[in-house]
């Protein structure tokens, strides 16, 4: 039994570090996400190597649990009432941000000499965001405004746009290289998106009517965990997106469960401990050395992605007729970027091995950069727009 002692001690320390980060964030207005990632960076192999390997090994399952909870909570924001009030803004701004980010990064990198196929793939990576970091920044702000509600809706559907754009650009990039465009890739992406949505509906519809019957109008903690784990597990088993499936299930439940005052309130109570471990272990996996491995291309990518998101957020806000003071802040609020981009990079490297090293190194470096500075800019944007 003594073999478990280092992992348990480390786990206890991580929870206390999370508590300290929460308190420091409240006093300094620094996002606790950035503080936790920085703690993980210092405690990981890139720092003092204080986190046991056994604890790092549980990161994949912790990330699935934490992100599944985030997906449910984001889906719970897509009520009919929210869609009636902010649906136009959510769809318009999200599409504009994706389009302008893609165009800015792809054309900018191609202009400085990056091969077109690689520039297209890197542009697709740039469209991905980090829903967990963005949602936690919103929660930490303690505000519920039109801007924050719209932002949560954008983050909720962003993953679906990212999958579609990435699959489409693989087809285009393969055609540019003279290879078989592989239209089945686009079909596979559509199957993943709509299959995930169908799974969310299959689980969400009965859950909406069956949960919350044993207590006074609210789902029990076990019910909430059961639905979250069931959705994530089935999605992984069927090779679907557990983020899209969880978001769909949350949206179905919040709209159909008339006896709930809020969709899975218990998830909010359970989420934070998992998020502490998730962000600290995510920080421990970051490799700061990657920042020095990509040089001018990496710097250009970061600058172009920031400009693309600012331009897309502003134009999308203008088309959606959101208040003028909010339009400049949608882009900065959507800068956090995490594991989805790295997953896309690994897949792109398989299809374009000649550019694989550059794409993967750039994705890792961008994750380090935007995970640390993205939440800070998102927090600043929330204060300015609110």
Image (spheres, grey):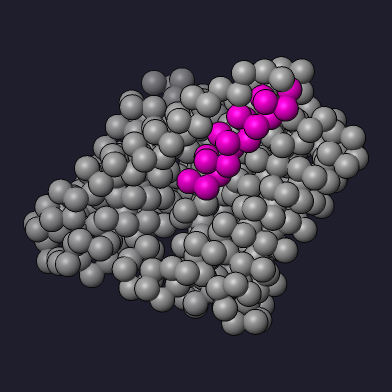
Look at the picture and state if 213 lies above or below 147. above
Residue closer to the observer: 33 or 236: 236
Residue 115: where, in percent of width, then height?
82, 30
Q: Is 165 colored magenta in this rendering?
A: yes
Side (left or right) of 216 relative to 18 = left
Side (left or right) of 312 relative to 275 = right
Q: Which residues are magenta?
A: 160-177
Residue closer to the observer: 275 or 386: 386
Q: Main secondary structure of the magenta part?
A: helix
Look at the picture and state if 13 lies above or below 261. above
Side (left or right) of 374 relative to 116 = left
Which quadrant does the N terminus fall into? Answer: top left
Q: Is 203 colored magenta in this rendering?
A: no
Residue 333: where, in percent of width, then height?
63, 63
Residue 370: where, in percent of width, then height?
70, 49
Which quadrant does the C terminus fall into? Answer: bottom right
On the question of residue 328 being in view, the answer is yes
Query: What is the quadrant of residue 342 in the picture?
Result: top right
Residue at 33% x, 27% y is 238
On the question of residue 375 being in view, the answer is no
Residue 303: where, in percent of width, then height?
82, 52
Residue at 64% x, 53% y is 99
Residue at 31% x, 54% y is 250
Residue closer to the observer: 83 or 220: 83
């Amino acid at each position: 039994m003594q073999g478990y002692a280092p992992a348990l001690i480390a786990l206890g320390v991580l929870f206390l570090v999370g508590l300290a980060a929460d308190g420091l964030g409240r006093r300094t207005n620094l996002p606790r996400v950035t503080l936790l990632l920085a703690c993980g960076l210092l405690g990981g192999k890139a720092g003092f190597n204080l986190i046991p390997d056994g604890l790092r090994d549980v990161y994949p399952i912790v990330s699935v649990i934490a992100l599944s909870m985030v997906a449910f909570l984001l889906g719970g924001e897509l009520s009919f009432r929210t869609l009636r009030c902010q649906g136009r803004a959510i769809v318009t701004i999200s599409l504009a941000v994706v389009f302008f980010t893609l165009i800015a990064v792809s054309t900018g990198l191609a202009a400085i000499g990056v091969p077109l196929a690689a520039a297209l793939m890197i542009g697709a990576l740039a469209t991905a965001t980090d829903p967990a970091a963005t949602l936690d920044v919103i929660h930490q702000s303690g505000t519920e405004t039109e801007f924050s509600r719209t932002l949560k809706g954008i983050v909720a559907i962003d993953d679906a746009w990212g999958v579609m754009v990435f699959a489409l650009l693989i087809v285009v990039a393969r055609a540019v290289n003279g290879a078989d465009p592989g239209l089945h890739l686009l079909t596979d992406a559509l199957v993943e998106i709509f299959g995930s949505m169908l799974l969310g509906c299959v689980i969400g519809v009965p859950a909406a009517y069956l949960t919350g019957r044993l207590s006074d109008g609210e789902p029990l903690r076990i019910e909430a965990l059961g639905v979250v784990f069931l959705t994530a597990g089935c999605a992984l088993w069927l090779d679907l997106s557990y983020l899209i499936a969880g978001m769909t299930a949350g949206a179905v439940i919040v709209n159909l469960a008339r006896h709930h005052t809020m969709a899975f309130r218990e998830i909010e109570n359970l989420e934070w401990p998992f998020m502490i471990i998730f962000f600290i272990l995510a920080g421990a996996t970051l490799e700061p050395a990657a920042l020095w491995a990509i040089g001018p291309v990496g710097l250009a990518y970061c600058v172009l992605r920031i400009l693309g998101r600012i331009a897309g957020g502003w134009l999308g806000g203008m088309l959606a007729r959101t208040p003028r003071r909010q339009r400049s802040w949608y882009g900065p609020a959507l800068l956090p970027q995490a594991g989805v981009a790295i997953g896309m990079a690994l897949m792109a490297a398989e299809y374009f091995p000649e550019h694989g090293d550059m794409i993967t190194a750039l994705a890792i470096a961008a994750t380090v950069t935007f995970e640390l500075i993205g939440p800070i800019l998102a927090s600043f944007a929330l204060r300015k727009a609110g």
